[in-house]
Image (tube, rainbow, N blue to C red):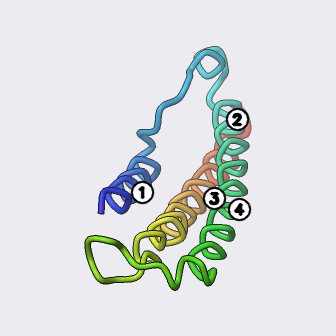
Amino acid sequence: MLIWLTFIGASTALRDDELIGLDLLDSRLNFRNKKLIKLLIHISILFFLLFVAYYGTKTVFSPGILNQTASTFEFSMAYVYLAIPVATLIMIIHIVTAIQKNIKDVRRYKDC
């Protein structure tokens, strides 16, 4: 169940803002512009996660996956593939929270 650990770990890293990133532009901007750039990045991540959640769910409930069983264990492979939509939904919750926080920060520091 390494796939479950990987995706849940990625959602935790997203929540804690510990994902890998570049700070080339970030170090040259003031606080408000940093938050605006971060907001734009979070919105693009949200659209990507919605895309992955939609097609991940579509894949899990496809007849090919639902009828497939694991060779070593006697359970449906849908449980393995279910890690993708579940983890992306958790990530969507985290990214929406981050977007709300960024909007508050941008509004708070209009003059910075």
Q: Which residue is mark 1?
A: 7
Distance from disc 1 to disc 2, alpha carbons, whole Å, reads 25 Å
Residue 49 marker: 3
Distance from disc 4 to disc 1, alpha carbons, whole Å, reads 16 Å
The residue at the point 67 percent across, 34 percent down is 32
Within 10 Å of the Cα at label 3, are there few (<14), some (14-19), or many (20+) other Cα atoms? Answer: many
Label 2 vs 3, first from the N-terminus? 2
Left or right, residue 58 beside residue 20? right
Left or right, residue 77 beside residue 105? left
Within 10 Å of the Cα at label 4, are there few (<14), some (14-19), or many (20+) other Cα atoms? Answer: few
Contact (Cβ within 8 Å) of mark 1 with mark 3: no
Contact (Cβ within 8 Å) of mark 2 with mark 3: no
**Between 84 and 34, the one nearer to me in the picture:** 84
Quarter of the image containing the C terminus?
top right
Mark 1: secondary structure: helix
Contact (Cβ within 8 Å) of mark 1 with mark 2: no
In front: mark 4 or mark 2? Answer: 4
In front: mark 2 or mark 3? Answer: 3
